[in-house]
Amino acid sequence: MKIIKADVLGMCFGVRDALAIIDDVATPADVTIHGELVHNEKILDDLAERGFKSVGEGQRRALPVTQAVLITAHGISDKERARLAQAGKQLIDTTCPLVTRAHQAAQKLQANGYHVLVIGKRGHAEVQGIIEDLRSFDVIQSPDEVRTFPHQKLGIMCQTTTPVRHADEIRAAIRAKNPRAAIRFVDTICHPTKDHQKSLDRLIDEVEAMVVVGGHNSNNTRQLVLRCQAAGLPAYHVQCAEDLRPEWFDGIETVGLTAGTSTLDETIDAVEHAMQQLSHHQLASA
């Protein structure tokens, strides 16, 4: 079995920067991570073992017990920052700068009188941080959710990990159902997401199946899986090498390997090694 790796895969600079910041924390037990640093279970387990406290993304209304609070790569709203600051908390900020750019785009659209349409996953930490600072908005997950909006000006922006094709489909639906509205689109999809998706597209026609490595809560990893499935390509989402199943590769001669933007290099290497071992076993059994 031949294994072909995507030419762009794995951790983006925003995640690497967040991990570098947290590695410099001298006393982890004195810091509460405000949500999930990144959507990668191995990283979260490692942080817990180091002694960091954390709160779930759905339980962030209660104030953290520690003085120091670490803002995750997905960011938070300005309202939430103000609430934490007013409580005397010291903020350690690991927000990805491209997420910050998406926040600024949404607020600028609002300041210019647009009803903001956020293309993204409802309830996701990044999306939640964006909409908490908006007065007039809707979150749109699919073209089926698009309707005629009672606003003269519609401003469209995206969660940073939105697939480009998905965003284009929703934008087209918005324009079709709101022909009289003044519509402005700000492209806030991050370049690492675009690069991962383009790399996957180049690989899809070369393989018979795909292994996608990343956390089960990772939106960008899930979107890579969905892209494969939309192209009719079997795709297997794994968090680690132990998740691989030999029967997935029965009769498969060429398999692709890619990974989401919060996946550690060591995890990708371990999965690739395990796939190579399965390939050797196939040859030995033939």
Image (spheres, rainbow, N blue to C red):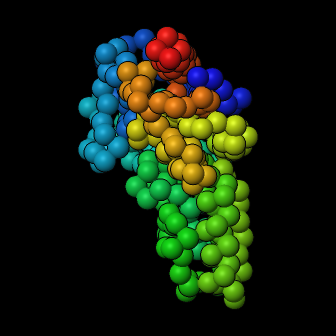
Q: Using residue 127 as the reference point, say whether residue 84 is left or right of it.
A: left
Question: Which residue is at a point 51% across and 73% down the rendered structure image?
Answer: 144
Q: Using residue 64 as the reference point, say whether residue 89 is left or right of it.
A: right
In what quadrant of the picture does the N terminus appear?
A: top right
Question: Which residue is at a point 66% across and 26% down the rendered structure image?
Answer: 4
Task: Please determine whether, in this image, residue 17 is positioned above or below residue 237.
Answer: above
Question: Which residue is at a point 41% across and 30% down the rendered structure image?
Answer: 247
Give coordinates of residue 44: x percent, y percent: 38, 26
Q: Using the rendered view, name the quadrant where residue 261 is placed.
A: top right
Of the pair 139 and 267, the residue shown nearer to us: 267
Question: Which residue is at a point 43% across and 21% down the rendered structure image?
Answer: 241
Of the pair 10 and 154, the residue shown nearer to us: 10
Give coordinates of residue 281: x percent, y percent: 47, 14
| Residue 276 appears anywhere in the view | yes
Of the pair 21 and 233, the residue shown nearer to us: 233
| Residue 104 appears anywhere in the view | no
Give coordinates of residue 65: x percent, y percent: 26, 32
Of the pair 279 and 171, the residue shown nearer to us: 279
